[in-house]
Amino acid sequence: MAVMHVTDSSFAQEVLQAHQTVLVDFWAEWCGPCRMLAPALEELAAEHPEVKICKVNIDEDPDLALQYGVMSIPTLVVFRDGQVVRQSIGLQPKQALERLIV
């Protein structure tokens, strides 16, 4: 499954109502570590089709970032059944990302 971009209008349907684990990457276009994380997220999406991976651009949807307490980017938030179960802040290696979604 490819990485999906979500917005305030699609967040509830794609993340909160999803029937599988969802990893949300809160990022911004100008963020170097966010861009460095993107290839690992693409690999993760290809290798773990059971997990939905979404990206939220905090510049375009600042209310979502505020709602989930995003103070620094990249911030990764794992949701199950509409609830936050894990969070990670900063650039992480792919192995750490895999541990987040188990």
Image (cartoon, rainbow, N blue to C red):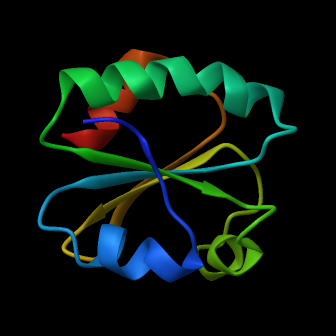
- The answer to which image quadrant residue 20 occupies is bottom left
Q: Classify the position of the N terminus by image quarter.
A: top left
Residue appearing at x 50%, y 62% in the figure: 6
Q: Between residues 77 and 36, which one lies in front from this camera angle? A: 36
Provide residue 66's location: percent of width, then percent of height: 71, 78
Residue appearing at x 67%, y 20% in the figure: 36
- In the displayed structure, does residue 100 sit left or right of residue 34? left
- In the displayed structure, does residue 64 sit left or right of residue 23? right
Q: Classify the position of the C terminus by image quarter.
A: top left
Residue 83 visible in the picture: no
Provide residue 48's location: percent of width, then percent of height: 18, 30
Q: How many circles with numbers are drawn on the protein?
A: 0
Residue appearing at x 74%, y 27% in the figure: 33
Residue 63 visible in the picture: yes
Provide residue 45's location: percent of width, then percent of height: 30, 31
Decide: is 11 above or below 6. below
- In the displayed structure, does residue 90 sit left or right of residue 32? left
Decide: is 38 above or below 78. above
Provide residue 44's location: percent of width, then percent of height: 32, 25
Q: Residue furthest right?
A: 30
Residue appearing at x 41%, y 39% in the figure: 3
Q: Between residues 75 and 45, which one lies in front from this camera angle? A: 45
